[in-house]
Structure formats: structure tokens, C-alpha cells
Image (cartoon, grey):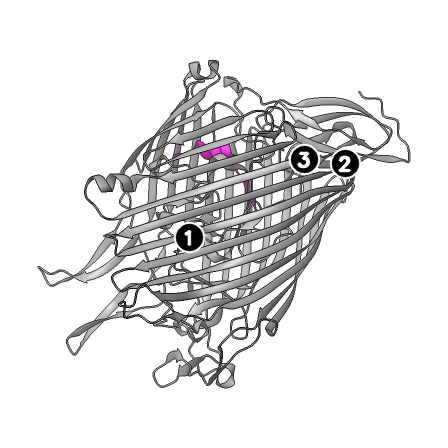
């Protein structure tokens, strides 16, 4: 038992925790002081700070995959102690796949949050053997997607544009490669990821469904290392090493697909491929200052017979300055550039099309460790947006196409926030905060004016909504404000500990989203156009409530999480019938402000230790949307009734299992079952002047067939590779083992032979075997 000398005076213990082999900072490390019954975890930059009374203490530092550090310190003044953690070798009789950084913390007021380690993600069987961060999240409760082959994801019945996706704090606007078959995140370059489905802290804002926060690795500042992989569709390579040993490091990682090269061997003029680049530079100026520069650049190219070429992708850059003001105040100042570009080259009609969104963000965040029971986070964020809805340029003088430019839009969004994590007693803790956001729609050319400020008309005789006539257009300078919004966004999460193994938690959060994705699909596509709130389109407002029960079983060998949620969204955009979204310079004429709601029950049961590990997740939920009439005379969309959203899935069940046979062989399995997506089928047809016209029923009143599949994989790690200092592995996978032909869509046509109407199912993937070779040295 340590000798504790209690006094009225207290001191701060602080420092940074890193990997001993690479000097990589570690996120979410647990630093526990058992005798004081308290502890702290490292922040996004590996920093910790805790205030203790004067005395002698035993300190325990633990983290998934690393040897636990036990240190005895004497605290008679403020002390800064940096810890280096050594990676732990796995033992067969006690393989630990998930721990504090991936499992649940009974006492912490954190709920509706899922964390997956990169090692877990890399072990999951996936299509074409390509490790995919986003598709791994689909195995968690409350997370689904818009169909097979889509990298977009839906959280608790929300739309894809309602997810805030951050890579090193920079916004990613489209997370897919190859139109959704893969995500843009290279797993080799990622250090940590966390998905917030609810109880979202006040430091995050701008979306109303979820936050996916991903951090890239800093790079090895001790020695040069390389790793990569060769797969059936793409290959990847990462290099890292010191700029100045123990002070500065670099990391550069690239991926590229090459399936299109095989098409050229068959004289096929079509091609589709992607490439991306991740980079990170870090430099420790002194003990209190660190600079980090990180970036990402990715492009997809789709070409059909040299007549149609589509190019799209993200580019982000972030310069950060970490500064320690004092032992208990850590700050981060970030200057961020983010860009999403979409381009078309249509040689057969003679023009190019360019569009996109550019975002500049300056943010300053503070972590203030007041004492071991009370921590503050506060900061200010400033965002500037430029929206390019589209620009047409003729390729040459003979194209027959005139230059045409949709009106650029501009906006400025800022926010200030403060939040506290407060341990009120041994049994009760809370995280609460307030965010205030402001949004300013700035001046633009050709701003449309309408009668009574209504860009959508209603034809009472036909019961249809139509585009209103534009009375006139006005132009405003960039410095003028066309419309402004101000909103308070309170957040609170509570945890009550029943005992060391059981707790109940509850949360509420209000969030505001000022940007809208204009799309006629349920999955993100490159042609999707972002537009800001303004005079005619109001920001989306979310109120979400959640309550849950959390339990660790048998010394954390098992864990159980059960959550129920309800969310209400105001001003969710809905489209009038027959809406034309392509090259539309007046989007406000085809949309109405509606509302949405979602509610459900989520269950996650994990087996965390042993040779066999994994989890079973189940979600029972409902997601609905409604757009009533603006006046008693209007019928609204779908007669003003609630209807299933495009993301509604009643049942969503998934099982994930990993079996460590020995040091050489690991086996993995996934099974997924989901209710089919909501859709609208024709109920009748009529013929007018020789043309057959279908008649449709209620919006999303029908469903695709249920979706289910089984995936298997095996990983072989040769023992002799490790002895040579060269590590390698082979991953053998089978996607969709029993060749289920899941419906991606169903269309209707008249059979040319029988002249009878028939339904045609489109399936993307049957059974797909794969082999991937991974290496590290």
C-alpha cells in the first residue's frame, strides 16, 4: 500500500503517452490512481493531466495491446512525466481483442458511442478483400447503409448528409471510392476512430445524425518503417520515419486500384479506378509546443470509350499547433482547408462540367483539467464555404454548347462552445455543455425573388406542387448578409453507476445543420450538390433523447449495451413530385421543408477475451418523414402522412466472430440480416396516346426483399517472417458464401416475348473469393 500523505495542497501530474517503438502518441490511454479512486484518459494528442493531493501514489497506465506500466511517484510539486508503452505479445490462452478503448466505460457519462481498433477492422472479411473502415461500422447497432456497394452510411435512421465525417479534423464530403464500392480511408494510415450516434459533445456541430471522428497516425520518429498490401483490386504502400530522431516524423501512404489495366488487355475501352494519398508531418518544437501538418488527396476516374469521363474526389489540408499553456491547460489551433470536386468530360456532346464545395476552417480548442473530478473543454470554430453548383465549358468551337454557370453561393458559419465532464459522486457523473452557432448566407449574383417569398406553388385543381415563377433577380456583394440564423445547442449526458459492473445512462442533445445535400438517391453519388440554408431553405434542427443500460460481465470477459433512442428533426427537405435536380439554378423551387423522426432499440453483446471473440448486434427501429401542407388547402407530400424514409430498416442483425487457432491462423466470420429498403412500386398503369404511364402508390409504401449474407476469411501469418524482422500475412476471404442474390433495386418492364409486365431484380454481388498479401518491415 503506498504511503499517502494527505494535505490541503494539491499538485498536477501531466504528460504525454507514446508508443516506445515509434514515439506515436496514443489516444484513450487509461492512467489510473487506484488508492485515490480516480483516473484520466489521454486526449486526441496523447496528453493527460490530473490533479492530486500531495502524497506518494502508485500509477497504472494501461492500453489495448500494450504492457501495463506500474509506477510509484512522489507528488510534492507539479510534475510532468511522459510514459512510453511497449507493445505486448499476444498469448493464446488470453487473447484480448477489445478493451477500454474499444469497449464500454461503466462510470464515464459517454453513451451512443462506438469505437473500433484498426486491428479489429483489418480482421473483418470484406468484399474483394479490401479492408474498409466504413463497412466495418455497418456491423454495429444503429448503423446501416443505403444498399450493397455503397460507402455511405445511415445512423439511427438519418440520411447520409447528416453525418459529419472528419479526417484529422477536416471535413470529408464524399467518403466513397468507385461510386460507393470502397471508402476513402486507408486503414494503414489511421490511428483512431470514434463514431458518435448520440450524446454528442458540444465541441461537434454542423450535422444532425452522427459524427465519425478519424485521426491519422503521426509517423515513426525513431526509425524508418514500411508496410503495405497487394490485393485483387488495389494495392497500398506506407512509408514512415524520423525527420529528426525523437522530435519529428513523416508519414506518407498511397493506394491505387488497377483492375482497369486488365480491361485494356481485352481491348475494352472502358475503365474505372481510384487513387489516394495520405500524408502527415509532425515536429516537437519543445516540451510545450508541437506542429502537425496532415493532408489527404483522392481521385476517382470513370471512363467510357473516351467519350465520357467522370473525375471526382476530396482534398484536405490541416496545419495544427499543439500548445501547453500550463500543466492543466492543453490547446490546439487548427487551420483547415477542405475541398470536394466533381467533374465531367462529355466528348460526345462537346463540353466539360465542373462543380464542388470549398471550405476554410479556423478552430481553437482548449482542454482544461480543473481537477480530477471536473474537466472543461471550450473553443471557437469559424467556417467559410463556397459552393459551386455547376459550370459548363465548351470543349471547342464546334461543340455547339454555350458557356453556362450556375450561381455560386457563399456562407459563413461560426460557433462557440463550452462543455464539462463532472464526476459529482462515486456513483453519479455528468457531461454537459452548450454550443451557440451562427450562420450567415452571404451575397451572391442573381438571387431569385418570388411572390410572397414562396418559391413553390400549389395547384389546388390538380393537387400538385409546381415551380413558382421568378419575379426578378437581384445581385448582392459578397459582404452583404442575405439571411442569418442563430441557435443554442444544449447537450447533456448522465451516468449512474449501480456497482462496479452495472450502470444506467441517459442523454439529450440538440444539434443544427445548415448545409443540405441535394440528391435524388438514398446513397451519396458524385453528382450530389451541397447547398446552404438561406431565405427559402431553413436549417435542420434535431432533438435526440437516449437512455441505456450498460454491464460488464465476468471481469469484462463479456459486455452488454442496451440503448433506446428517439429523435425529432425539423426542416428536413423533401422533393416535390417530378423534381429536376440536374443543373438546377433554383433548387428552392423543387423542395419543401418537412420533418422527420426516428426511434428504436439497440443491443450490443460482446465477448471480449479468449481465443474466440466477437459481438452480436441487433437494432429494432423506425425512420419516418412527413411534409404536411403549408396551408389547410394544401395536401402536402404523400397527402401529408408519415411515410418510411429511404433509410428505414425495421430489423438489422449482425454477428461478427474471430477465432485465434494459433499464432499462424486466425479465422473470421460475419453474418448480416436486414429488412429490405423502403421503395415505391407502381400499383397500376394506363395508356395515353400510345404511351404506357405507370401509377405509383404511397411514397416508400413497398420494400425490397430482405438482405442477408455470410462472409468468411482466414489469415495466415508465417512464424518465420517475424524471426527475420519482416512480418507478412495472407488473407483469404469469401464474400457472400452462399451466393445470395440480394436485390439492389427492382425495376418493372414489359417482357418483349410475352408482352406481360414483369419485375426485374438488379443484384450487384454474388459469391466473391479474394486473396490479399500484407507485409511490414
Residue at screen point 41% across, 24% down:
729
**Residue 732, percent across and down?**
34, 28
Q: Residue at x 14, y 75 (%)?
A: 690
User: Alpha carbon of mark 3 to alpha carbon of mark 1: how far?
Assistant: 51 Å
Other residues around mark 3 within 10 Å, as few (<14) / some (14–19) / many (≥20): some
Image quadrant in which the N terminus is located = top right
Q: Which residues are magenta?
A: 110-125
Q: Which residue is mark 3?
A: 284
Q: Residues within 10 Å of mark 1 (few under 14, many from 20)?
A: some
Q: In this rendering, does residue 41 appear at all?
A: no
Q: Give how far across and how far down residue 269 sits, in percent.
A: 22, 48
Disc 1 from disc 2: Cα separation: 45 Å
Residues at marks 3 and 2, CA–CA distance in whole angstroms: 23 Å
Q: Sequence order check: which comes first, mark 1 or mark 2?
A: 2
Query: Helix, strand, or loop for circle 1?
Result: loop
Left or right of 16 on screen, residue 344: left
Tell me the tag on residue 50: 2
Q: Earlier in the sequence, mark 3 or mark 2?
A: 2
Using the rendered view, name the quadrant where residue 390 is placed: bottom left
Q: Nearer the viewer, residue 657 or 421?
A: 421
Q: Which label lies toward us, 3 or 2?
A: 3
Residue farthest along the left direction in this orientation: 753
**For the residue carrying disc 2, how many other residues have a C-alpha within 10 Å: few (<14), some (14-19), or many (20+)?**
many
Residue 159, disc: none
Quickly name the residue at label 1: 650
Amino acid at each position: 500500500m503506498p504511503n499517502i500523505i494527505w494535505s490541503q495542497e494539491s499538485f498536477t501530474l501531466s504528460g504525454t503517452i507514446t508508443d516506445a517503438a515509434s514515439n506515436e502518441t496514443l489516444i484513450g490511454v487509461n492512467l489510473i490512481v487506484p488508492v485515490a479512486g480516480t483516473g484520466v484518459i489521454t486526449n486526441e494528442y496523447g496528453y493527460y493531466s490530473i490533479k492530486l493531493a500531495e502524497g506518494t501514489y502508485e500509477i497504472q497506465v494501461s492500453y489495448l495491446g500494450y504492457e501495463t506500466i506500474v509506477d510509484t511517484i512522489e507528488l510534492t510539486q507539479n510534475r510532468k512525466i511522459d510514459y512510453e508503452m511497449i507493445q505486448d505479445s499476444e498469448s493464446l490462452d488470453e487473447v484480448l481483442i477489445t478493451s477500454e478503448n474499444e469497449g464500454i466505460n461503466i462510470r464515464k457519462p459517454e453513451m451512443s458511442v462506438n469505437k473500433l481498433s484498426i486491428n479489429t477492422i483489418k480482421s473483418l472479411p470484406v468484399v474483394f478483400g479490401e479492408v474498409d473502415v466504413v463497412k466495418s461500422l455497418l456491423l454495429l447497432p444503429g448503423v446501416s447503409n443505403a444498399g450493397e456497394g455503397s460507402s455511405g452510411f445511415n445512423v439511427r435512421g438519418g440520411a447520409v448528409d447528416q453525418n459529419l465525417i472528419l479526417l484529422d479534423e477536416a471535413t470529408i464530403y464524399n467518403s466513397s471510392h468507385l461510386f460507393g464500392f470502397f471508402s476513402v480511408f486507408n486503414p494503414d494510415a489511421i490511428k483512431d476512430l470514434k463514431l458518435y450516434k448520440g450524446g454528442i459533445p458540444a465541441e461537434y456541430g454542423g450535422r444532425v445524425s452522427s459524427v465519425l471522428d478519424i485521426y491519422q497516425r503521426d509517423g515513426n520518429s525513431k526509425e524508418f518503417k514500411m508496410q503495405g498490401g497487394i490485393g485483387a483490386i488495389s494495392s497500398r504502400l506506407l512509408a514512415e520515419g524520423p525527420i529528426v530522431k525523437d522530435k519529428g516524423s513523416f508519414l506518407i501512404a498511397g493506394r491505387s486500384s488497377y483492375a482497369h489495366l486488365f480491361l485494356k488487355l481485352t481491348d475494352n475501352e472502358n475503365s474505372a479506378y481510384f487513387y489516394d494519398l495520405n500524408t502527415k508531418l509532425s515536429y516537437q518544437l519543445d516540451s510545450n509546443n508541437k506542429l502537425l501538418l496532415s493532408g489527404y488527396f483522392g481521385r476517382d476516374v470513370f471512363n467510357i470509350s473516351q467519350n465520357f469521363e467522370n473525375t471526382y474526389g476530396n482534398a484536405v489540408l490541416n496545419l495544427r499547433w499543439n500548445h501547453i499553456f500550463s500543466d492543466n491547460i492543453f490547446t490546439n489551433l487548427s487551420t483547415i482547408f477542405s475541398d470536394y470536386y466533381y467533374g465531367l468530360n462529355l466528348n460526345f456532346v462537346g463540353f466539360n462540367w465542373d462543380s464542388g464545395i470549398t471550405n476554410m476552417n479556423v478552430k481553437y480548442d482548449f482542454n482544461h483539467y480543473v481537477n480530477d473530478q471536473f474537466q472543461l473543454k471550450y473553443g471557437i470554430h469559424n467556417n467559410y464555404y463556397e459552393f459551386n453548383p455547376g459550370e459548363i465549358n465548351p470543349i471547342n468551337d464546334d461543340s455547339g454548347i454555350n458557356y453556362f454557370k450556375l450561381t455560386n453561393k457563399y456562407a459563413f458559419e461560426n460557433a462557440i462552445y463550452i462543455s464539462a465532464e463532472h464526476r459529482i459522486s462515486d456513483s453519479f457523473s455528468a457531461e454537459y455543455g452548450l454550443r451557440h452557432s451562427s450562420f450567415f448566407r452571404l451575397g451572391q449574383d442573381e438571387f431569385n425573388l418570388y411572390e410572397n417569398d414562396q418559391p413553390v406553388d400549389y395547384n389546388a385543381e390538380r393537387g400538385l406542387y409546381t415551380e413558382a415563377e421568378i419575379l426578378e433577380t437581384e445581385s448582392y456583394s459578397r459582404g452583404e448578409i442575405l439571411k442569418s440564423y442563430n441557435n443554442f445547442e444544449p447537450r447533456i449526458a448522465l451516468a449512474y453507476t449501480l456497482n462496479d459492473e452495472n450502470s444506467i445512462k441517459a442523454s439529450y442533445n440538440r444539434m443544427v445543420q445548415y448545409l443540405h445535400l441535394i440528391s435524388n438517391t438514398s446513397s451519396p453519388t458524385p453528382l450530389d450538390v451541397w447547398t446552404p440554408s438561406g431565405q427559402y431553405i431553413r436549417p435542420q434542427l434535431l432533438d435526440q433523447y437516449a437512455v441505456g443500460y450498460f454491464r460488464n460481465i465476468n471481469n469484462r470477459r463479456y459486455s452488454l449495451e442496451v440503448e433506446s433512442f428517439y429523435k425529432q428533426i425539423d426542416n428536413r427537405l423533401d422533393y416535390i413530385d417530378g423534381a429536376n435536380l440536374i443543373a438546377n439554378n433554383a433548387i428552392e423551387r423543387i423542395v419543401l421543408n418537412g420533418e422527420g423522426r426516428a426511434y428504436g432499440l439497440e443491443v450490443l453483446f460482446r465477448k471480449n477475451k479468449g481465443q474466440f471473440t466477437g459481438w452480436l448486434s441487433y437494432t429494432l427501429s423506425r425512420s419516418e418523414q412527413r411534409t404536411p401542407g403549408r396551408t389547410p388547402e394544401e395536401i402536402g407530400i404523400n397527402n401529408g402522412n408519415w411515410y418510411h424514409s429511404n433509410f428505414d430498416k425495421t430489423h438489422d442483425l449482425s454477428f461478427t466472430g474471430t477465432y485465434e487457432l494459433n499464432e499462424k491462423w486466425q479465422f473470421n466470420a460475419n453474418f448480416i440480416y436486414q429488412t429490405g429498403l423502403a421503395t415505391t412500386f407502381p400499383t397500376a398503369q394506363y395508356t395515353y396516346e400510345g404511351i404506357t404511364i405507370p401509377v405509383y402508390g404511397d411514397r416508400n409504401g413497398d420494400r425490397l426483399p430482405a438482405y442477408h449474407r455470410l462472409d468468411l476469411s482466414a489469415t495466415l501469418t508465417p512464424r518465420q517472417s517475424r524471426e527475420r524482422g519482416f512480418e507478412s500475412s495472407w488473407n483469404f476471404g469469401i464474400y457472400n458464401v452462399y451466393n445470395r442474390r440480394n436485390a439492389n433495386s427492382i425495376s418493372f418492364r414489359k417482357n418483349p416475348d410475352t408482352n406481360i409486365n414483369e419485375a426485374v431484380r438488379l443484384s450487384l454481388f454474388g459469391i466473391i473469393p479474394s486473396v490479399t498479401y500484407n507485409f511490414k518491415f
